[in-house]
Image (spheres, grey):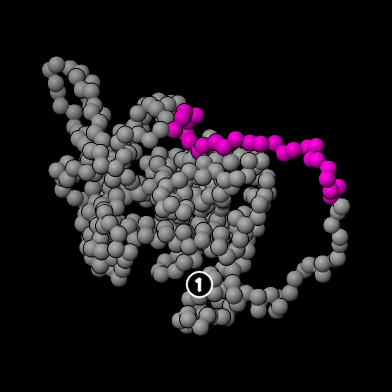
Amino acid sequence: MLAVDVSPWLRPDANTCADRSFCHTFGRGEGKHQMVPGWPYSVVAALETGRTSWTAVLDAVRLEPGADVAAVTAAQLREVVERLVAAGQWKPGGLEVLVVLDAGYDAPRIAHLLAGLPVEIVGRLRSDRVMRRPTPPRVYDPKGGRPPKHGGEFVFGDPPTWGAEQAVTVTDTRLYGKATAQAWDRLHPRLTRRAAWIDHDGPLPIIEGTVIRLTVEKLPSGGVNEPVWLWWSGTAATKADVDRCWQSFLRRFDLEHTFRLFKQTLGWTKPRLCSSEAADRWTWLVIAAYAELRLARPLAADLRRPWEKPAPPNRLTPARVRRGFRNLCTETGSPDSAPKPSRPGPGRPPGSQNRHPATRHGVGRVLATGEAYSRPAHHKKGTRPRRTKERQT
């Protein structure tokens, strides 16, 4: 299982930093969504099974201003999967690599861009989406006219349009109580020639998949219990496929623990760098340090705090492994020599003016097109689900 997500390196006051974009943040002091300038990084990590906060970070790419998120993510995933196949991590005949995405990604388009690779896409969809059913069989019409390309509508917010499910599963979970998953087969979005598909050659594709609706009995935080809609790139889903999809989506949140460790413990966003290239190098140094912690997981001792519960040696969290990592450094040794003392340079004389001021740079957006961003009316809370009508003659 691979998880993909974007984590920002916020630089709101760094006007001299180039290649900054508006990054989506939440809960920054006011508890609401904000767009803050910074460097957004797209990270791909391999997920583990079971209750754990460990991930294996495989790749990180900085999104430049004006970048197409879906295209960059698809190219990044293609390179990662090809490396895994070349390294023997995936062999023909095995299960396809499952890629888990959050609601900010266009899952059907990424599945179309990754055609030909042994991958499956599971992505979260907004609750106001409208899908289309398969094309109905052609019936002779004496009046003539173009045959329809899409079937009836599947409106997420309108239960009478759902019809019979392909598969239904009920699972008892520890945190969420009874979890019910419903699946509908062969549903696809109705694409139009705008935004990302405006320059597509030939007829627009029909990207079919399985829509999964997940409802739980309770939430651990006591928040609003709303259903979660998922889209799987496979079809003819069985009960085992439905359970694997929604349980894999819950494992995606392990990547959030990795981002928190990067920022709060390993100091990923602490340096005040002016160059985006230097930020890329520092990001890979942090990833290398995290890889060393993963390798030292079975060797580190549990240096727990007095208020923490004991944990088995093979079940230590990344923060606990980092505490015991310093005891391993004395045994492994280092190829570096002792640092030599030096004195800092004289710098600019006191009282003199800076004759070479740094260049100021603007802040861009990470969008598929260069048009100005405006929130669509159907995305506002409280509006009716969006419906689409097909012209038929």
**Percent coordinates x, y for residue 330 in the rendering:** 71, 78
Q: Image check: 352 left or right of 3?
A: right
Q: What amino acid type is highlighted by mark number 1? A: Thr
Asked if residue 135 lies in the magenta stretch, the reply is no
Q: What stretch is highlighted in magenta?
A: 347-373
Q: In this view, does 325 lie above or below 94?
A: below
**Percent coordinates x, y for residue 128 in the rendering:** 28, 42
Asked if residue 361 lies in the magenta stretch, the reply is yes
Q: Image check: 265 left or right of 376?
A: right
Q: Residue drawn 14% across and 16% down? A: 143
Q: How crowded is mark 1: few (under 14 residues within 10 Å), some or many (20 or more)?
A: some
Q: Which of 196 and 221 is in front in this view?
A: 221
Q: Residue drawn 25% across and 42% down? A: 382
Task: Say which element carries label 1.
Answer: loop
Q: Which of 139 and 290 is in front in this view?
A: 290
Q: Residue drawn 32% across and 57% down? A: 246
Q: In which quarter of the image is residue 202?
A: top left
- From the image, give the main secondary structure of the stretch colored magenta: loop
> In which quadrant of the rendered image does the N terminus lie?
bottom left
Q: Is residue 309 above or below residue 189?
A: below
- Dot 1 corresponds to which residue? 317
**Percent coordinates x, y for residue 29 in the rendering:** 46, 54
Q: Is residue 328 visible?
A: yes
> In which quadrant of the rendered image does the C terminus lie?
top left
**Percent coordinates x, y for residue 231 in the rendering:** 32, 47
Q: Residue drawn 46% across and 30% down? A: 372
